[in-house]
Structure formats: C-alpha cells, structure tokens
Amino acid sequence: MNGLKYKVVAGPEGFLPPAAASMGVELPEAGQALVEGCSVCASEGLQKIAEKLVGAENPVFFPGPLILWNWKDGVAEKAVALKELAEAVGAKIIPMPDYRPKYPMINPAIEVNPNHPNLTIWHNKIDVCVFIGVHCHYANVALKIIRGGTNCYTIALCGEAGHEDAMVSLRDAGLAELKKLTALVRKLKGEV
Amino acid sequence: MNKPIFQISPGFEEIMPPEYRDLVANGPYGKGFGVGDLGAYKELVEEHPLCAGCGLALSIRLALASLPNPEDTVVVGSTGCSSLVFPQVALHNIHSLFGNQNAVASGLKRALKLRFPDKEKDVVVIAGDGATADIGLDMVMQSWFRRERITTIMLDNEAYANTGGQESGMSRQGTVLNMAPTGKKFPKASIPEVAQAAGCAYVAATSPAHPKKLEKAVRRAVLIAREVGPTYIQLLSPCPTNYKFKPHETIPLIKQREKEGTFQNQEYISEEAQRFLDSLEEARKK
C-alpha cells in the first residue's frame, strides 16, 4: 500500500469529510476490492471484512431496499444468505427500507436512514457496520456522513462497482461472495 | 399484494419497522381503495408535521386516497408547506426546485413511457399556489402547451404560508397577511381559466369540504391525463396559521366561502375527454 495515498479510515473526520474520490481514491477493477482506499485482490478484501466482523464488539448489517424487498429473481436467495452471514457473525440487522428523509421521526433503534445514519450508529453504539443492497448514491452519502461524524468502521458489500467512501468495499458482491464470507467468518471463529 | 415489489424478502419480515409491515399487509397498493375506505386501511400518509387544521394536509390526504393506481404513481412536489409532508408519504415522490415541478414531471412522464412502454405510470404534480401560479407558472403553462400527459394539482392556501405569510397570486384582493400588511392590491388569479385556455383536457376546482367530489376529480384527472392530455385540479386549502382562524374552522370556512360566492366548485371537460369518460363508463357497464 502506498503511504502517501489518502486513507479511508474510521472517523470522526469532521463535519464535511472530502469524498474519497476527490482525494484520488479510485474504484477497484474487477476481481479487486478496496481496503482503506487501496486496491487489493478480492480474496484479501473478503479476509479483511471477515476479520473486522469477527473482531467487532457490536457489528451491525444495514441492508437496503435492493435486498429487503423481494423485487426480482435471485434476491430471496441473497437475503437468506445475508441472514446466515449475520447469524454466523452474531450481528444485529437494522434495515434501511427506503430513502425518505424521515427526520425527526426516524426511530434509530430499529431503522437506519441514509440522510442521518449517524443517529442509528450513536444510538446503538455500533463499531462496525456493513452496507448491502443500498443504491449507490445513497450509500455514498451515508458512508460519508458516517466517516465524518462517527468512529464506526464501514464495510460495503456492493453488487456494482464498489464504494470509495467505505473503509472496505467489495465489488460485484453476489450470492457466492456472501457464502464465502460466511465460511470465512465461521473459520475465524473456529466453528469449522 | 399483487405487486411483487411490495414483498419483503424472506427472513426480513420481523426486522422491518412495523409501519412497513403494515403497509405491505394493509396498504392500498393494487386494491383500488378510495376515500370511502379511509380508516379501513394503512394510509399513504400518516404522521406529518403540518399545522393543526391545515387545509392542505386534508387535501393531500384525500388526493392520495383518490389515486386510481398509487403503486404506479409518481408524485412530483415543490417547495412549500406540502414539501414537509412528502418525506412521510409512502409513494414514489420527487422534490423539485421551487416552481420547476411541471418541467420535472414532463421529463419523468416521458422517461417512464420509454422505460415502461406497456405499463401505465401516472405522474401527478402536487404543489402549492406559489409554486403553481407564481414562481412556476411558466413551467406549468409550457407543460400544458406541450400537452404533457400529467396531472397538476394545486393546493391553494392563498398565501406563502411557511415563510411567514406573504401574499401570492392566489390571495384575494385586500387580503392582509403578516408580510402583506397593507393588503393585496390585485385580484386572485383565475388559473382554471388559464388551464382551459392553455389546453388542459380536464379542469376542476374543489376542496376537502367535498371528499367525494375531490375523489371524482382526481380520478378523472389522472385517467384523462393518461389518454387525452394535461389535466388540472385546484383545491382550496385554507391556512389557519396565516389566516388566523381556529383549526376546527377549516371546513366551515370553505363552506362559508361557497355561500358568499368567493369560491365555486367547477369542472370543465373537453369534448375529447368527455368521449373518453363515456367510453370508460360503457366499458364498466359491460
């Protein structure tokens, strides 16, 4: 890893942290992942995610609408795999069912919203969170807010090209990657 | 549910916040509910931050309950009191720049037609009188000139209500408001006439004092917009905060306005739109 590069690390970085892309962090190529702003191979990224999840005090998954709603073929299988992963980690799941800016009515104990994810993180004292199934632009906004105002470590399991603003980001994360991650978590926990 | 998009993924049913579970189980999507069913299902808008007795809140509640296909409707809003409600509305909705709502709705309708050529997707603009008759009148009228297949609903509270109470083009002559202390010097604009002249196939003016009339107007407007051309509805929605009357006086005030002739329920249907409505009626009878 290049020491001169901008590092995407846990905050709080300030009220308006720069977008990682504007600091030179580029999205990973196919087969790669991003770890704290640097491109690594996907398997290394998976390993890092599994280690972070297993080592966390209060890891929480934030599934978005793309996985919470059974809107097309393949989603149900992915949802079941995500539940298995969360169970293997021993993590809570707090949903982001849509993107309405419901402030000040959001209940941070049971939901997360892209416009103020910090409320959910502070309320639940979350030290590691995982975004999955959140549309790109809303994930970017939320990840930046989290980095700006909290010390939560962010992970993005992205079905598309990845997220520069997450501390670890996997791209093209599908059913197979979720299953691999579950196996890695179980291995790290000594369950297999 | 007849729409797979409103199914919760397996395993997540218990994790979803209760209001979402309620919307899936008891929401109006795909069920053809109307205002007569209010109270018997989970509404699209429930809690909102508008003032007690707000006529606009009543109008929005009834207009949303009147949509023929809420699951395939996108609402475009604009700046104003109504924009405080839409974050709580369980429908696709877009907030546009102040006054830009009909331009956004035009593009949206065309894009939806390209994306879903075999499906009816209704685009309904719901904005206040400032956005519709003053700041956005250019965009509103241009969308009518272009015969865009959208419905425009103006929530007419006769003021700029959430900025302290300035007069709008829809305030009546002589109206005194907090920020219009000497009284408005010009008469209320007649947007229904403008809409008719600008090419709207259906124009109606009504109020939440007549829920069934309001429902009929919204349904007709949305259906006509699909097949014939642009439609316009004006809903008188008095503002207790700026006009300084008690919250429970909203509906009596509208009725008083009707009695004294300062507000009239009206409806205009173009010949083509009437033929379309007749064909719907014939099909229904068969």
Image (cartoon, rainbow, N blue to C red):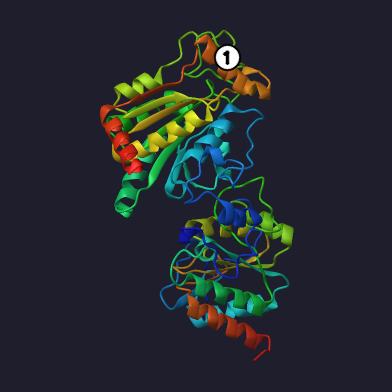
Q: Chain of mark 1?
A: B
Q: In terms of image quadrants, where is residue A131?
A: bottom right
Q: Is residue A181 above or below residue A163?
A: below
Query: What residue is at 56 percent from the left and 49 percent from the top?
Result: A100
Q: Is residue A124 above or below residue A53?
A: above
Tell me if residue A114 can be seen.
no
Q: Nearer the viewer, residue B147 or B44?
A: B44
Q: In terms of image quadrants, where is residue B21?
A: bottom right
Which quarter of the figure is the C terminus of chain B placed in? top left
Q: Name the residue furthest bottom.
A: A192
Q: Is residue B183 above or below residue A17?
A: above
- Asked if residue B31 lies left or right of residue B279, the reply is right
Q: Nearer the viewer, residue B152 or B264?
A: B264
Number of labels in the image equals 1
- Residue type at tag 1: Gln
Residue B73 location, x and y as percent? Answer: 43, 46
Residue B253 location, x and y as percent? Answer: 60, 18
Check disc 1 and report its element: helix, strand or loop: helix
Tell me if residue B92 can be seen.
yes
- Asked if residue B81 lies left or right of residue B93, the reply is right
Query: What residue is at 52 percent from the left and 48 percent from the top?
Result: B28
Residue B210 location, x and y as percent? Answer: 53, 26
Residue A10 location, x and y as percent? Answer: 64, 65
Bin the neighbour count of mark 1 within 10 Å (Cα to Cα): few under 14, some 14-19, many 20 and up.
few
Tell me the residue that label 1 is attached to: B256
